[in-house]
Amino acid sequence: MQSITTLQKQVDSWIQQHGVRYFNELTNMAQLTEEVGEVARIIARRYGEQSEKDSDKTKDLGEELADVLFVVLCLANQTDTDLQASFDKKMDKRTKRDHDRHHNNKKLY
């Protein structure tokens, strides 16, 4: 399994080799919104109550999630965010905050 740091470097290398430059942050934010919308469409139609159109049945959820991840990694790179450190910090916070809360939530059993 690759670390988030490795993924950030991989995306940066791809941008350097295949792109001219990163899109600016606002463009990438709009792109992220579009990609999340594509994920939402698949989830709503495949797992939700909406009917799935024939054109939707060939959509690959994993690829769409990977598109979201790619843009998130771009945003992290261009804002000098160490996403691995931020993720680790967030997981530690969630673990401390939510462990008992979720075990005590009767709705989850």
Image (tube, rainbow, N blue to C red):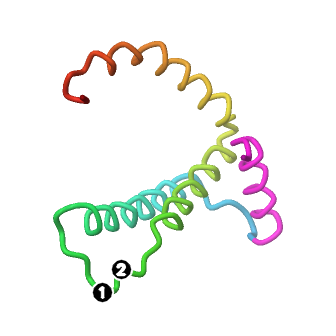
Q: Which residues are magenta?
A: 1-18
**Amino acid on which disc 2 is placed:** Lys
Q: Determine the residue positioned at 39% across, 67% down.
A: 38
Viewer-side residue, 81 vs 53: 53
* Residue bearing mark 2: 57
**Amino acid on which disc 1 is placed:** Asp
* Residue bearing mark 1: 54
| Percent position of residue 101, x then y | 32, 16
Viewer-side residue, 16 vs 89: 89
* In contact (CB < 8 Å): disc 1 and disc 2: yes
Magenta segment includes 90: no
**Left-right relation of 67 to 105:** right
Residue 6 vertical position relative to residue 61 in the rendered view, above or below: above
**Residue 3 figure quarter:** top right
Predominant SS along the magenta part: helix
Magenta segment includes 8: yes
Q: Determine the residue positioned at 76% across, 55% down.
A: 12
